[in-house]
Image (spheres, helix red, strand yellow):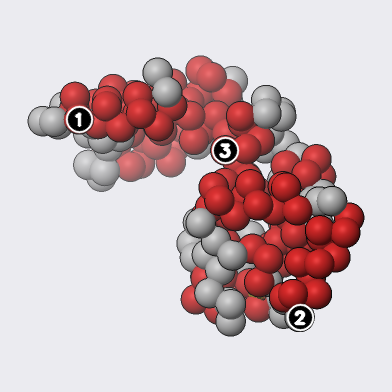
Amino acid sequence: MQAIAEDRIRLTGEKKFCDEITALSGQPVISCYQCGECTAGCPVAFTADIMPNQVTRMVQVGLEEPVLRSRMIWLCVGCETCTTRCPRGIELAKVMDALRETAVARKIKPSEPSISTFHKTFLDSVERMGRVHEITMLAEYKLRSGKLFSDLLLGARMFLKGKLALIPEFLKGRSDIKKIFNKTFGK
Ligand code: SF4
Ligand code: SF4
């Protein structure tokens, strides 16, 4: 079955995108045989535009634009439920990561801008301090996203319960973390 799928993709000349995502994610996307187990267990499938099994199929047949513009690749929370269910051992969260990275590299506007902004703000916080400082990260996220007044009560409750530290903690070895960022993002 896998050989037939590979031959079809070669015939239609769409193997390049599948190879690219396979290399980036380290996952054998071509071996997906559409059983749907990933979709059946995915906690965000109910709100997504395309299902996780459709993501792998679209990668296999080279439907680059629709999959890179989909909401699903940004909604995936990396819970790995799909991985535990997949009979082919595909780690779909890594495939979603690879698709997000590819979408960003190709400057495709994310279909879930607030999630993309949250990712960036989270990483900026880790790069600066070696770990996330929730209060500064949330303030920065609100400024960048324009969602100034959302979740204010929740934030206040968390602060009063001591879940949010006021003073940031700067970790030792931040220069090593900086080097990882530099290497990853080619700065
Ligand atoms: S890792 Fe992503 S695709 Fe897989 S079940 Fe979780 S949310 Fe769904
Ligand atoms: S569970 Fe695995 S084989 Fe089944 S559809 Fe999902 S990715 Fe494909």
> How busy is the neighbourhood of tag 2: few (under 14 within 10 Å), some, or many (20 plus)?
few
> How busy is the neighbourhood of tag 1: few (under 14 within 10 Å), some, or many (20 plus)?
few
Q: Mark 2 vs mark 3: which is more N-terminal?
A: 2
For the residues labelled 2 and 3, the Cα–Cα distance comes to 30 Å
Q: Residue at x 63, y 47 (%)?
A: 20
Q: Are marks 1 and 3 in contact (CB under 8 Å)?
A: no
Q: Secondary structure at mark 2?
A: loop
Where residue 36 appears, as percent x and y from the top left, is: 71, 76
Left or right? Give the position of 61 relative to 135.
right
Left or right? Give the position of 163 relative to 43.
left
Q: Nearer the viewer, mark 1 or mark 2?
A: 2
* In the image, farthest residue toward the right: 12
Q: Mark 1 vs mark 3: which is more N-terminal?
A: 3
Q: Amino acid at mark 2?
A: Met
Q: Which residue is denoted by mark 3 in the rendering?
A: 101
Q: Which residue is denoted by mark 1 in the rendering?
A: 176
